[in-house]
Image (tube, rainbow, N blue to C red):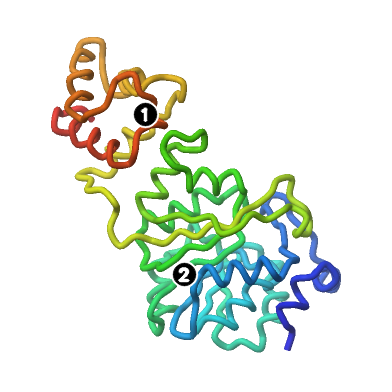
Amino acid sequence: MTGIQDIATPRRTKEIIQRHGFSFKKSLGQNFLIDQNILNKIVSAAGLDHTKGALEIGPGIGALTEKLAQSAKVVTAVEIDQRLLPILEEVLAPYEHVKVRHGDVLKLDLNEVFASDFAEVSKVSVVANLPYYVTTPILMRLLEDRLPLENIVVMIQKEVAERMAASPGTKDYGSLSIAVQYYSEPELVCTVPNTVFIPQPNVDSAVIRLRVRETPPVEVRDEKHFFEVIHAAFAQRRKTISNNLKSRFFTKENRGMLEPLLDQAGIEPSRRGETLSIEEFARLSAVLLEAGIS
């Protein structure tokens, strides 16, 4: 049986890809991890056991997949690159409880995947080394679809992970921070240097764990409007909340309504979007809706 320690090394990774004549596609953001310590941290953060399932996105040559197979009852790995399927079939042959699906996770019916693949497990976590270029669309799809997930543990670009975990009043805090924190509780697990990948990416990575919330931390009547208010507030970061909202929601004729509404929400017009907490955005959205501003 091929061990995870064999795969997650430069020598073993190179041997596998050379034997199969595999070449990396930059357009797919393929960077294979060659450090077993990082793999251990990723799997540990997911809190898996033999009653739980794992959904992996972009398994590559199966280094993380095999580690997941040794920790979870059921593993499904979704791989977009057809050229990797024979490699995965070879590496994962000893594990009958691992299924590899060929496809784009953004186009798959994930509810069907959960119903068919994870019917026999108590909880499911997403565990993945995500391509940088589709990190945000994939994570927001997983969160917005409100899939029955316990954790999402992913390795992503360090800068993006820091934005997801950022607090109000910091330079990294923005609409992405609030969106992720509305659906989950983010926690940075570790940073990952670019030297532990083949090929090496241009930037460092980080592992982040998103503990998926059963209910959001704030009550929001209209989620679409709530997020529109947030996006408007960050449209131009140097502008005040008042000026950004005027540009998005108000005409010259009704702009006089804004300051009394901000006062009603308990928000100073001179503040910037990055200083507002998720609770303040929820309050502001509710006040604007009540006034018919949408």
Q: Nearer the viewer, residue 224 or 103?
A: 224
Q: Earlier in the sequence, mark 1 or mark 2?
A: 2
Query: Residue at 40% of width from left, 67% of height from top?
Result: 149
Q: Nearer the viewer, residue 14 or 215?
A: 215
Q: Which residue is mark 2?
A: 125
Q: Secondary structure at mark 2?
A: strand
Q: Which of the image's four quarters has the N terminus?
A: bottom right
Q: Which of the image's four quarters has the C terminus?
A: top left
Q: Position of residue 202 (x, y in %)?
A: 74, 45
Give how far apart the Cα atoms at labels 1 and 2 are: 32 Å
Vertical order, 109 against 233 (above or below)? below
Q: Which residue is mark 1?
A: 232
Q: Position of residue 56 (x, y in %)?
A: 55, 68
Query: Residue at 22% of width from left, 19% of height from top?
Result: 258
Question: Relative to 79, is 185 on the left or the right?
Answer: left
- The amino acid type, in three-letter code, at marker 1 is Ala
Question: Relative to 61, is 73 on the left or the right?
Answer: left
